[in-house]
Amino acid sequence: MTNRKYTFVVAGGLALLALFAALWVVMIIPKMNRTAADSLGMGDYALLTTDRTQFTEDSLKGAPSAVFFGFTHCPEVCPTTLGDIAGWQAELSDQGKELRTYFVTVDPERDTIDMMQEYVSWVPGVVGVSGPEEEVKKAITSFRVYAQKVPLKNGGYTMDHSAFVMLFDKKGRFVQTISYGEQFDSAMKKIDALH
């Protein structure tokens, strides 16, 4: 092999090695370091909001957001959480800040958009979200929340569901949750960290 061919082969091999190293750093390592939380809220769901816009993963981008899953026939968790959200929104308003908040139904069979509008209308900054059952199921999967229909003795049903609020930054990335009944100051500290 001549020196010229040898140099060409070595240069080609080094170029391929450099390309592989670049691909490793740019594509492989980020995927290896990705957690399940990094994909929360991402998916191909398309629901309708009470302000008549579409709710998709893109809805979480552009400003800090909170997402809560529940239903309008909820006896305790949902009204209590909406009361907490009203307190957070009042505090944020005093600070000149906002938090987009989405209340997504886990009971699309009963929770129409009009029903959701009436249910959330008393809480500033909260938008109700509903849609076809298959789209709601996609959203439940995308956000990794729990929701299960529970039959009642009278022939009706209730819904068992996750009881936390999920917080997302302005890039639409999941940050952390606020637990059901979490103290006001603790919740506000988490929300303030988004701004």
Image (cartoon, grey):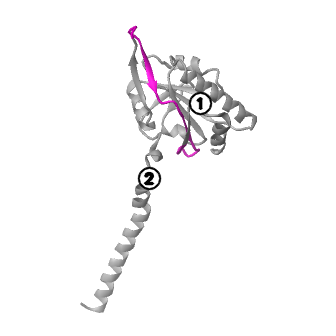
Mark 2 or 1, nearer chain start: 2
| Residue placed most toward the observer, 148 or 142 | 148
* Residue type at the position of mark 2: Arg
Residue 106 visible to the viewer: no
Give the label, 2 or 1, closer to the camera: 1
The disc placed on residue 181 is: 1
Give the image location of residue 144, x and y in percent: 43, 37
Q: Is residue 82 above or below residue 154?
A: below
Please report the residue visible at 36 percent of the width from the left and 73 percent of the height from the top: 17
Please report the residue visible at 30 percent of the width from the left and 82 percent of the height from the top: 9
What is the quadrant of residue 190 in the picture? Answer: top right
Residue under label 2, please give it. Answer: 34
The disc placed on residue 141 is: none
* Residue type at the position of mark 1: Gly
Q: Is residue 29 above or below residue 38?
A: below
Task: Please count the marks in the image.
Answer: 2
CA distance for labels 2 and 1: 30 Å
- The verdict on residue 1 being magenta is no
